[in-house]
């Protein structure tokens, strides 16, 4: 796990200044405290910071090249099938000098060219420089676990694992993009390729840049098209196969030359991971964050019991409201682009605690998106029945639900699931509020008329992939390609790497994801039960008391409670302060009305309110020039 960056003057061929690349690399030194490397040759410069996980020797130094210096690689991430690929490459005559996965990418490119990306099962942001062809490839992994940002200015490409590296190359922080801001307030994140900065982009999951012959283009390299199994397996066959795939994936993700542990919640997803890890050893170190018994989100007791069952050593982090508010500015500045998940602060602290004992931690992200674990999946799964109702009945139901207090999820469902266009319907399911309501939060003249439509443009390349998929699988494909990589995985990467901790997500192993995408909807949501097949597998490992535990949103109810009951506090003060920077773009009266409605119990606006607070804190950190590291 590392950090990469680079500059390519691809149009005019002017030499890159070595100090410019060094400055970019220094800006992400936290990602790789163990080693650094630069390669500057003519119009190309590559920078690298190393966090040593595999082959801790100098043989893993990057940038790495072949013996003749024809091909160079900088790589951030882990390739979990590198041993199999190495054996195949050795059978074809390749000679290796190290035990690290970076060299497998290098030799793989020499053997397969651009096709090497499709053979990699892992997480990565990487750059491959083909010297004889003067060709640069910059790519993000299939699931988008590792971020890659870039900007193009006057024929110059600047790229890096984090925005701060790109800004260091540009020598400036670009202006805020109102369109990106609008999308952030709708979805709590900004979908690729957009960011909140004008002219700065991020690669989408499974996307690459190719720069050759004085031209730059972006394209998808990961082209897996989910096609339902025909005939579908029986439930027993599917569970048996999934369990075996889980076993293989966890075994791959445990490969490490440094201490490894697990971020443990009280639920079944991380519990299953611990059970599978226990097949390879005992007394794994685990780490949990909690708030105390007064909050129903608290998982400390449940996690402690899970750890006891499997003989793990659990370490707890307790977080209260004061610490949450004190930490929020630093956490938001670390993220670089705002993500308004209430999990960001607890994620920061549990990663900090884990790094005291281990250098690698597994995390249970993924089953909710793969197998339908959220409430919205129920609506999507059974939304066809709602759309089949006569318009008059649908209108009456919608009107009745609109009058209910604090039932925003149900209200979103009624206005979303009745939309005919499939991608637009999914867009509405994702939105915290109807598009017109979000637009109304802005001052007059700030937004262009079609600002909210930009998300559909971002997702348009996915339309062909939806063909042949049922409603739930289509929606989950959008989650896997957008909200998961650009929201949950993005903040997981940055809030762990700021502590020099590598986080791995075994459930997003390519073999698991591609298998799950081919299963029909009734293997995921059946008779109102979410994650049906995943639960079936869990029964082989987890006792009944774990399976019966209610799903807990990671800090969701805690933040709702704080907004509902707080009279003061830093977060609330931002909304009441006329000098808050967000009011350069947003309408103060509209924002304060959201808070008033929430406190009065008429509407549940805590998600939007938290998004607004995160946005204000992000603006302040940008204004102060703080980078959080």
Image: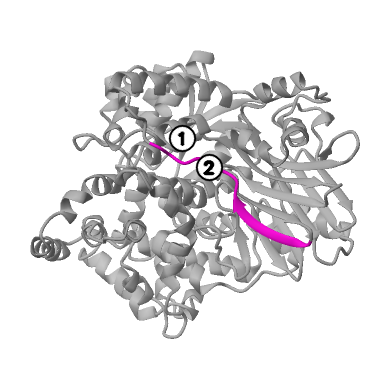
Rendered view: 160 above or below 108? below
Q: Is residue 224 magenta?
A: yes
Can you give x and y, in whole percent of width and height, for residue 580 in the image? 48, 75
Q: Is residue 190 visible?
A: no
For disc 1, the marked residue is 513
Q: Is residue 415 visible?
A: yes
For disc 2, the marked residue is 143
Question: Depth check: 579 or 80 in front?
Answer: 80
Total number of numbered labels? 2
Give the numbered dot on residue 164.
none
Colour setup of the view: one colour
Question: Depth check: 466 or 259 in front?
Answer: 466
Give yes or no for contact between labels 1 and 2 (Cβ–Cβ under 8 Å): yes
Question: Depth check: 568 or 491 in front?
Answer: 491
Q: Residue at x 46, y 53 (%)?
A: 462
Compared across the picture, whether 363 is left or right of 56 comes to: left
Outermost bottom residue: 445
Can you give x and y, in whole percent of width and height, for residue 55 in the image? 75, 26
Label 1 packing within 10 angstroms: few (<14), some (14-19), many (20+):
some
Q: Residue at x 63, y 41 (%)?
A: 124
Q: Quadrant of residue 578?
A: bottom left
Q: Is residue 233 magenta?
A: no
Residue range (magenta) = 214-227
- Quadrant where the N terminus sits is top right
Can you give x and y, in whole percent of width and height, for residue 263 in the image? 49, 33
Q: CA distance from mark 1 to mark 2?
A: 9 Å
Counting residues from the N terminus, which is met first, the one under dot 1 or under dot 2?
2
Q: Residue at x 39, y 41 (%)?
A: 369
- Secondary structure of residue under mark 2: loop
Label 2 packing within 10 angstroms: few (<14), some (14-19), many (20+):
many
- Secondary structure of residue under mark 1: helix
């Amino acid at each position: 796990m590392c950090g990469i960056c680079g500059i390519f003057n691809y149009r005019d061929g002017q030499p890159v200044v070595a100090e410019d690349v060094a400055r970019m690399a220094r800006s992400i030194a936290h990602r790789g405290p163990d080693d650094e490397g630069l390669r500057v040759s003519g119009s190309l410069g590559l920078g690298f910071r190393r966090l040593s996980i595999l082959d801790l020797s100098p043989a893993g130094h990057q940038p790495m090249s072949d013996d003749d210096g024809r091909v160079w690689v900088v790589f951030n991430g882990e390739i979990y099938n590198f041993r199999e690929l190495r054996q195949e490459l050795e059978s074809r005559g390749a000679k290796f000098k190290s035990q690290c996965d970076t060299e497998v990418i290098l030799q793989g490119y020499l053997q397969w060219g651009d096709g090497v990306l499709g053979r990699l099962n892992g997480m990565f942001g990487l750059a491959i420089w083909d010297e004889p062809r003067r060709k640069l490839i910059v790519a993000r992994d299939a699931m988008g676990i590792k971020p890659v940002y870039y900007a193009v200015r006057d024929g110059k490409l600047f790229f890096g694992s984090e925005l701060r590296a790109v800004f260091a190359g540009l020598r400036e922080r670009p202006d805020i993009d109102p369109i990106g801001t609008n999308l952030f307030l709708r979805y709590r994140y900004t979908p690729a390729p957009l960011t909140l900065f004008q002219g700065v982009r991020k690669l989408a999951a499974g996307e690459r840049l190719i720069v050759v012959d004085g031209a730059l283009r972006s394209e998808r390299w990961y082209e897996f098209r989910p096609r339902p199994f025909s005939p579908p397996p029986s439930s027993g066959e599917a569970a048996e196969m999934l369990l075996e795939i889980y076993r293989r994936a966890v075994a791959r993700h445990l490969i490490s030359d440094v201490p490894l542990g697990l971020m443990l919640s009280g639920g079944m997803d991380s519990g299953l991971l611990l059970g599978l890890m226990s097949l390879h050893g005992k007394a794994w170190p685990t780490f949990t964050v909690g708030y105390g018994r007064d909050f129903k989100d608290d998982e400390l007791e449940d996690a402690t019991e899970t750890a006891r069952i499997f003989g793990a050593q659990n370490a707890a982090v307790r977080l209260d409201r004061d610490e949450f508010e004190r930490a929020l500015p630093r956490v938001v500045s670390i993220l670089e682009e705002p993500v308004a998940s209430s999990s960001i602060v607890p994620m920061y602290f549990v990663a900090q605690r884990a790094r005291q004992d281990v250098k690698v931690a597994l995390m249970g992200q993924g089953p909710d998106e793969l197998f339908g674990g959220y409430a919205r999946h129920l609506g999507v799964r059974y939304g066809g029945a709602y759309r089949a109702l006569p318009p008059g009945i649908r209108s009456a139901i919608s009107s009745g639900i609109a009058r209910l207090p604090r039932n925003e999820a149900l209200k979103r469902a009624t206005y979303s699931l009745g939309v005919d266009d499939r991608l637009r319907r999914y867009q509405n399911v994702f939105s915290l509020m109807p598009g017109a309501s979000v637009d109304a939060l802005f001052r007059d003249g700030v937004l262009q008329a079609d600002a909210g439509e930009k998300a559909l443009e971002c997702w348009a390349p996915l339309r062909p992939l939806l063909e042949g998929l049922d409603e739930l699988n289509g929606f989950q494909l959008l989650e896997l390609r957008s909200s998961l990589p650009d929201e949950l995985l993005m903040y997981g990467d940055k809030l762990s790497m700021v502590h020099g901790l590598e986080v791995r997500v075994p459930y997003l192993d390519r073999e698991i994801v591609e298998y799950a995408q081919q299963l029909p909807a009734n293997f995921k949501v059946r008779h109102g039960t979410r994650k049906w097949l995943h639960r079936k597998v869990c029964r082989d490992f987890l006792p009944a008391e774990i399976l019966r535990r209610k799903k807990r949103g990671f800090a969701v109810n805690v933040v709702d409670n704080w907004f509902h009951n707080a009279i003061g506090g830093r977060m609330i003060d931002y909304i009441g302060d006329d000098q808050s920077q967000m009011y350069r773009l947003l309408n103060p009266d509209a924002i304060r009305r959201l808070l008033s409605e929430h406190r009065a119990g008429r509407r549940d606006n805590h998600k939007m309110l938290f998004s607004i607070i995160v946005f204000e804190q992000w603006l302040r950190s940008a204004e102060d020039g703080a980078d959080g590291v």
